[in-house]
Amino acid sequence: MSLNQADRSDRIEFEALRLSGRLQYDADFDNLIRWISDRQACGDAYPLEWRVLVAEDDVANRLVLGSLLEKSGLQVITVENGRQALEALEREAVDLVLLDINMPEMNGLETARAIRALPGDHADLPVIAITSDVSPKRVIEMREAGFDICIEKPVRRDALFQIIVNSLSGRVAKVD
């Protein structure tokens, strides 16, 4: 079963699969994109003030994801594995976590479980899986680990941005 064959009630637009019902999906993208473009044209590099933590072991993927997110007006923190992601969460306030599933030292499934077990607001962070393995077995594992959404690789900027905005539209951005 491929992601495209998944139950349509679990589908979000584009190539993503909703794994939990915790997040709302009702952002007004056209107005938001115009607002972001206007703010960036005025020199505001991070108009959304949202901080996204990306854990991806592949250097090229990490650079591409970071660049896509920054071009969308988001602040990005990148790390190489799940252990570093947990360390970053101790130091940094973030609004959303993107986790590759297959990482060394601590994979995405272990990291998602650890995030859900953290005290305070960290346990409620939107956690999004990024993977090329969307087999039924893997989808069940991601759901049980506490992921909210799964995005299938290769990731497209419009899909990624829409999923992130939908995930964060109901949250107040963290301010350091």
Image (cartoon, helix red, strand yellow):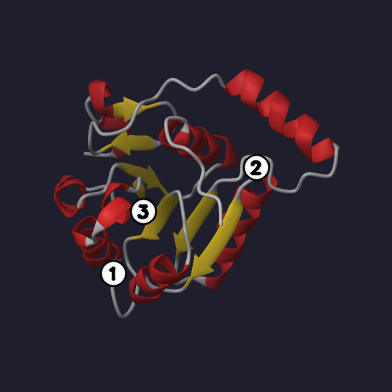
The secondary structure type at the circle numbered 3 is: loop
Label placed on residue 107: 1
Q: Residue at x 55, y 72 (%)?
A: 59
* Residue type, numbered disc 3: Ser
Viewer-side residue, 162 vs 2: 162
Q: Which residue is mark 3?
A: 132
User: Is residue 145 left or right of 148 when viewed as pictured?
Assistant: left
Distance between the Cα atoms at labels 3 and 1?
14 Å
* Residue type, numbered disc 2: Ser
Q: Residue at x 50, y 53 (%)?
A: 52
Q: Residue at x 36, y 53 (%)?
A: 132
* Residue type, numbered disc 1: Asn
Quadrant the N terminus occupies: top left
Residue 14 rendering spot, x and y as whole percentages: 44, 30
Camera-nearest label, 3 or 1: 1
User: Alpha-carbon neighbours of circle 3 within 10 Å: few (<14), some, or many (≥20)?
Assistant: some
**For the residues bearing labels 2 and 3, Cβ distance under 8 angstroms:** no
Q: Which residue is mark 2?
A: 72
User: Alpha-carbon neighbours of circle 2 within 10 Å: few (<14), some, or many (≥20)?
Assistant: many
